[in-house]
Amino acid sequence: MNFREIIDLIESAKLDSPVYRIKRYLDTKEKKFVYVFLSTRTRDEVTLDATERFYREYGSIWNIDNPEHVAQVIKPVAFYRVKANNLYRISVEYKDIPETLDELLEMPGVGIKVAKVFLAEMGYDYVGVDTHVHRIVNRIGIIHTDNPRDTDIILNRIVPKSLRRHVNVHLVALGQTICRARSPRCEICPIQRHCRYFLNRS
């Protein structure tokens, strides 16, 4: 599978995707972390609104003083009370956001998806696997897995290291605009020729 060509084709399509617009807002390490941390099980637009409200209210994780108030600020992100409590714990227990996988996974509320998507945003060579990435790589036939964890393991093995940090953002863009969970817009997809799903339909 030519991962370089797939990424280039998606990028050159200039998709009007929320994830591309959001990236322009995430201009600091801390904002990248908070956005990815809040994003689990939550639509991108909702996550961005919550992240913006959080920074208007607090300015920094390290200004948090009341997890119950944080919960109201970030609502309606999924599990907002749990996420608020974990952000408060991070503000108490950490002086900075670590940049290694093992350290990130020790943080309250940080799982493998959050850790790897954040590290990819920071320029490290990881594939972050969310629902878009899991769905698309299985749909187009790169791999065949039943869950995101297995997808994560395989992609972080088979994708060339230099391309790993680019996979999430571009596949998410494709998933938000064209390769949707329901009614994918295959007729305008920039990676048709790499997609078994499309070729089998044709």
Image (cartoon, helix red, strand yellow):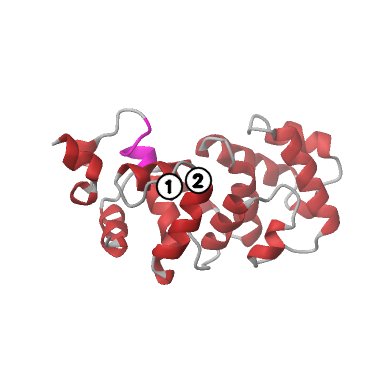
Give the structural element (helix, strand or loop) at label 1: helix
Q: Going by the image, does 115 lie left or right of 184?
A: right
Helix, strand or loop at disc 2?
helix
Question: Residue 128, can we see it?
Answer: no
The answer to whether residue 42 is seen in the rendering is yes
Q: Is residue 176 magenta?
A: yes
Residue drawn where x is 81% and y is 53% of the image = 91
Magenta stretch bounds: 174-181
- Rendered residue at 59%/41% (across/down): 40
Q: Outermost residue, left direction?
A: 202
Q: Is residue 38 left or right of residue 159?
A: right
Kindly check if marks 2 and 1 are in contact, taking CB atoms under 8 A apart as contact.
yes
Q: How many marks?
A: 2
- Residue type at mark 1? Val
Q: Residue furthest bottom?
A: 162
Amino acid on which the number 2 mark rests in the picture: Pro
Residue denoted by label 2: 148
Comes first in the chain, label 2 or label 1: 1
For mark 1, does the 10 Å Cα neighbourhood hold few (<14), some (14 to 19), or many (20 or more) residues?
many
The residue sitting at 52% across, 35% down in the picture is 43
Q: For marks 2 and 1, give the CA distance.
A: 8 Å
Residue 13: image x %, image y %? Answer: 26, 51
Q: Residue at x 39, y 68 (%)?
A: 160
Q: Position of residue 93 (x, y in %)?
A: 84, 57
User: Mark 1 sits on what residue?
Assistant: 133
Whether 31 is drawn above or below 163: the answer is: above
Task: Give the position of the C terminus as an image quadrant.
Answer: top left
